[in-house]
Amino acid sequence: MLWSRAFIPTLREDPADAEAVNHRLLVRGGFIRRLMAGSWSMLPLGMRVAKKIQDVIREEIDAIGGQEMLLPVVHPGEIWKKTGRWDDVEGILVKLKDRRDTDLLLAMTHEEIFTTVATELTSYRQLPQLWYHLQTKFRDEPRPKGGLLRVREFTMKDSYSFDIDPAGLDVQFQNHYRAYHRIFARLGMDAIAVHASSGWMGGKESVEFMVEAAAGEDEIAFCPACRYAANTEKATSVPAGVVDEPWTGPPERFPTPGIRTIAELTAVGGFASADRQIKTLVYLVGGTVTLLLLRGDHELMEQKVVDGLGTWEVRPARDDEITAALGAHAGSLGAVGVKGLRIVADPALRGRVNMVTGANDDDWHLRGVDVDRDVAVDTWLDIRLVRAGEGCPTCGKPLEVKRTIEVGHIFKLGTKFSEALGASVLDPDGEQRVIWMGSYGIGVGRNLATVVESSHDAKGIIWPMAIAPFEVVVTAVKVDDAASMGVAGEIHAALVASGVDTLFDDRDERPGVKFADAELIGIPYRVTVGPKGLADGVVEVVRRRDGAVERIAPAAVVAHLERLVKAERELGK
RNA sequence: CGGGCUGUGGCGCAGCUUGGUAGCGCACCUGCUUUGGGAGCAGGGGGUCGCCGGUUCGAAUCCGGCCAGCCCGACCA
């Protein structure tokens, strides 16, 4: 490929609206352009990388028995009504109508349609099956951001497994678990598998694959000692214990004029450190006013409430709802003596005595509260956000909390979709058996972006060989020097002939421009050909990763690069 | 959905307070000189100033509404 003929619109300056590294570098390097919020055009360079990522994914999914298909991106609403998701995922699901006024939707995922295809399965002899496609999804995210990290329209590889029983599902799930690790390794990323909340997928068990990155939106708890890892939506930990000073009598009221926060209360009297307070949050859970109790220094993880109480309708109560329920304002709330409201308490409060909490009377608090004695807890439920430094739930060593990007997610779906859509087979005994399903997703663009987030420097992107848009760029320093253009052209042709993906920078630009562009777009090796080097009988091979330079005879350079490129392509395999 | 900010050639920005000929840098085109880390000189092309309405003799500028985008939060495989 001649650079002079290629459409690679690099920008000298960062786009003004770009914050995330991948956003800055992919736009500046001419890989992508924005059409609207959360919607990006893939330019030639971006498409080259995306294709290579897709090829890696195909190879690994094919290797575990996947069969590629392509399912439609516009679905009839009818099928989604059968599984309940037409109504359940209100918001990000885009609905439309055709000319006959039929309800349609834009696919945000493909469980319904793969399951519809699977209704043709009739016998256990046909199982297991593993089907996948690489297809567009559209999710009307409330807030697209971070370049390619959170978008509305994107390409995803999603695979779906079909088995006669849970044991078969386990096998396919494990196969994906291993295939996903291989995929991320080949993309040059170190992915951590974590237990996750399944969200609206409604599965029984799910594992997310997370890559550490500052631009990430998820946090995971991670134990360096035993490798325990979980999304903080689900992670548990052993908080440092607190030794309570004994208190025998009943709770005692004390005045706290103007005190509204945990921090302010710690200063009153010196007996109410945050870990000796009970934090009382008022929520509406499934329409019911619910008190959520936490240790004063702990934070609520709402997703745990959603998962633990089994409803998506979870929101903080409004001020008027709070005063109607408890007769006081936020800042003076407590659960002592409260009747008729659901009370959910975090286990870190269990057995605690001599605690401080609000008296449900503005400007008054209670001390000497014995949780088990004084609070009518309906449900003990872990609703606490894990923090760095707390004990690992499996080995007790201190946990780390890392900011990460979710690059893949695998779900054990069970029989939810097959039951709703009637996908079943006859077993050896002639009995009708509902098919056990799993679904497994990897976002192509998000992975592309995550590689950039984790592999770049001040000059630009550093692509791993496996997915670099080009593997080598041959840079002619002086295009009106016939000798060096001749040598550069020969090297380019020979590299292409030997199967190396090579770009020939034949543009009539100053060397500085050419070097800067090559570094920005992140090509792993640059061969610099110019009169100065040729006078010494050499060309230069510069490695993008660390800038290492080798001076080498033109006649030897092609074989040398071919060896380097082919070795690096295999990294991670 | 709440808070903050921004919309002016392809990109980055000034001009708006105090209404009166739309400007700068980069990029682009032509010529000459230059050429191993984002060149110099000269000439040139390109803008409904986000949209609609209002005020005014006159609006990029003032007022109102709307739209779009970014950041924080809520939300969210």
Image: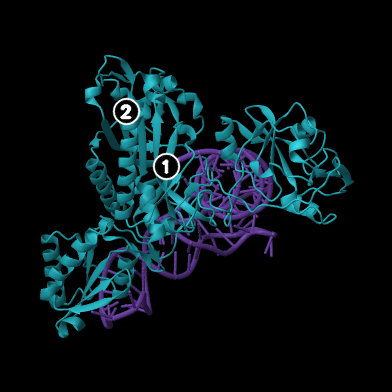
Q: Residue at position x 30%, y 69% from top?
A: A544
Q: Is residue A299 left or right of residue A10?
A: right
Quarter of the image where one finds residue A389:
bottom right
What amino acid is found at the position of numbered circle 2 in the picture?
Answer: Phe
Q: Secondary structure at mark 2?
A: helix
CA neighbours of label 1 inside 10 A, class few (<14), some (14 to 19), many (20+) = many
Q: Secondary structure at mark 1?
A: strand
Instruction: Provide the chain ID for the residue under circle 2.
Output: A
Q: Which chain is cyan?
A: A
Q: Which residue is mark 2?
A: A114
Quarter of the image where one finds residue A425:
top left
Against A480, residue A18 (above or below) is above
The percent coordinates of residue A430 (x first, y second) are 26, 14
Q: Is residue A498 left or right of residue A526?
A: left
State which mark lies toward you, 2 or 1. Answer: 1
What amino acid is found at the position of numbered circle 1 in the picture?
Answer: Val
The percent coordinates of residue A475 (x first, y second) are 23, 70
Q: Which chain is purple?
A: B
Evaluate whether residue A87 shows in this view.
yes
The residue closer to the viewer here, A253 or A88, is A253
Q: Which residue is mark 1?
A: A207
Against A219, residue B67 (above or below) is above
The percent coordinates of residue A523 (x first, y second) are 28, 64
